[in-house]
């Protein structure tokens, strides 16, 4: 059977084709699944989608009308999927419940160090043979306090790196991670974490309860010279409120690998177009902000695991098996 894979990156395509060889035929598309592109899936029982796919009610209905019965999402997050509608339509939906947490944890630290040590500004200057140090002064992190919102596998990985830097660890989560406690992490209320942390990093999933967990009040509670890093989901941060604080001259640096309105922008080349998102356009102009395009997971190790798990999800579906990756089971 032929599987149609939407939103496949150039680096990802050979990994998918190699993994599926000898199992099922896979046709990779670089276009993302939207209401406009959903008709392409007509006649395909199995569709694979990327993290920024639109799997809302209208798209799911279009897929089901075209004969799709199984959606295999190549990501851990599934806030883009209307699971209730999928259930009503009898669609089986699966995700990748686990891949290398180190990819994201290490990239979050890459962002933190980039804004702390002004790496992007320094690199741009030296390209123009400007070797001045003015405006490039950073701070030692040893002895300072890091606040980790979300201490699951990725948050734990981030905390281990922080521990290696010799930082004081504050954590916030619905449950304590014993591995983080062993590192010396102190669990506190979110408000205390935001008030005391020199660096705040977000590692919680996007849920109704966590949407805009960093809102205007949270931003105001943070130190004026704090660093904020988000490598989880864009909707965790109220970007309008963040821009307002940045305009007021606050924060040493902000590193964002995700953006709450990234769908339709990230993973695409918009360099020859006028980007109409005024908030994003303003955000990238701040000299103490680094924005990347949702690439924290993008290592050969993590993507390889994502592809292998997606293949296993397809094989399980074809064999009538159910795993922990299934979000919506097959209709009985």
Image: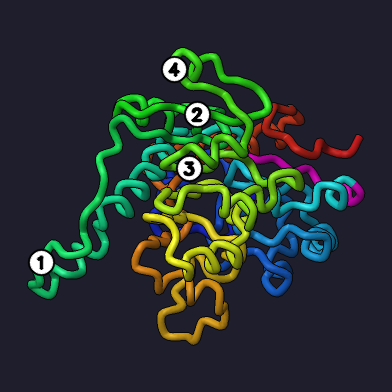
The tag earlier along the polypeptide, 4 or 3, is: 4
Q: Is residue 332 magenta?
A: no
N-term mark: 3 or 1: 1
Query: Is 33 situated above or below 168?
Result: below
Query: Which residues are drawn in magenta?
Result: 88-96
Q: Which mark is residue 29?
A: none
Side (left or right) of 294 relative to 84: left
Q: Secondary structure at mark 3?
A: strand
Q: Specify how the rendered protein is coloured.
A: rainbow
Q: Residues within 10 Å of mark 1 (few under 14, many from 20)?
A: few
Q: Residues within 10 Å of mark 2 (few under 14, many from 20)?
A: many
As helix, strand or loop, the secondary structure at mark 4 comes to loop
| Left or right placement of residue 249 versus residue 234 in this view | left
Q: Write down the residue under mark 4.
A: 184
Contact (Cβ within 8 Å) of mark 1 with mark 4: no
Residue on which the image places disc 2: 170
Residue at (16%, 70%) from the top-left corner? 125
Q: Which residue is mark 1?
A: 132
Give residue 200's mark: 3
Which secondary structure, mark 1?
loop
Per the image, is 93 magenta? yes
Query: Does residue 266 appear in this view?
Result: yes
What's the CA distance linking mark 1 and mark 4? 39 Å
What distance separates the C-alpha of mark 1 from that of mark 2?
A: 36 Å
Answer with mark 1 or mark 4, whichever residue precedes in sequence. Answer: 1
- Measure the alpha-carbon separation of dots 3 and 1: 29 Å
Q: Secondary structure beneath disc 2?
A: strand
Residue 216 in percent (x, y) is at: 63, 58
Image position, residue 171 (x, y; %): 54, 29
Label 2 near label 3: C-beta < 8 Å?
Answer: no
Foreground pick, 134 / 231: 134
């Amino acid at each position: 059977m032929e599987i149609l894979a939407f939103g496949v990156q150039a680096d990802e395509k050979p990994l998918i084709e190699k993994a599926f060889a000898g199992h099922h035929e896979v046709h990779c598309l670089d276009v993302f699944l939207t209401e406009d592109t959903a008709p392409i899936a007509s006649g395909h029982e199995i569709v694979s989608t990327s993290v920024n796919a639109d799997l809302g009610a209208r798209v799911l209905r279009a897929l089901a009308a075209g004969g799709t019965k199984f959606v295999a999402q190549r990501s851990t997050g599934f806030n883009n999927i209307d699971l209730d509608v999928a259930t009503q339509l009898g669609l089986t939906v699966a995700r990748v419940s686990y891949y290398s947490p180190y990819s994201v944890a290490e990239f979050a630290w890459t962002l933190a160090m980039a804004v702390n040590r002004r790496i992007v500004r320094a690199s741009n200057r030296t390209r123009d043979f400007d070797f001045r140090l003015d405006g490039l002064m950073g701070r030692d992190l040893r002895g300072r306090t890091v606040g980790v919102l979300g201490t699951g596998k990725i948050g734990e990985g981030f905390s281990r790196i922080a521990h290696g830097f010799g930082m004081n660890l504050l954590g916030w989560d619905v449950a304590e991670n014993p591995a983080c406690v062993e590192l010396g992490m102190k669990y506190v209320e979110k408000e205390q974490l935001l008030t005391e942390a020199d660096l705040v990093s977000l590692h919680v999933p996007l849920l109704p309860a966590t949407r805009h967990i960093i809102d205007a009040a949270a931003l105001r509670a943070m130190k004026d010279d704090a660093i904020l890093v988000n490598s989880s989901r864009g909707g965790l941060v109220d970007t309008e409120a963040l821009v307002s604080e940045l305009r007021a001259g606050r924060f040493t640096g902000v590193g964002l690998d995700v953006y709450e309105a990234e769908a339709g922008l990230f993973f695409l080349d918009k360099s020859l177009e006028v980007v109409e998102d005024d908030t994003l356009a303003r955000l990238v102009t701040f000299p103490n902000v680094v924005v990347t395009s949702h690439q924290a997971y993008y290592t050969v190790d993590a993507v390889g695991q994502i592809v292998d798990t997606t293949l296993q999800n397809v094989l399980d579906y074809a064999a009538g098996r159910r795993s922990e990756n299934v979000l919506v089971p097959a209709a009985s």
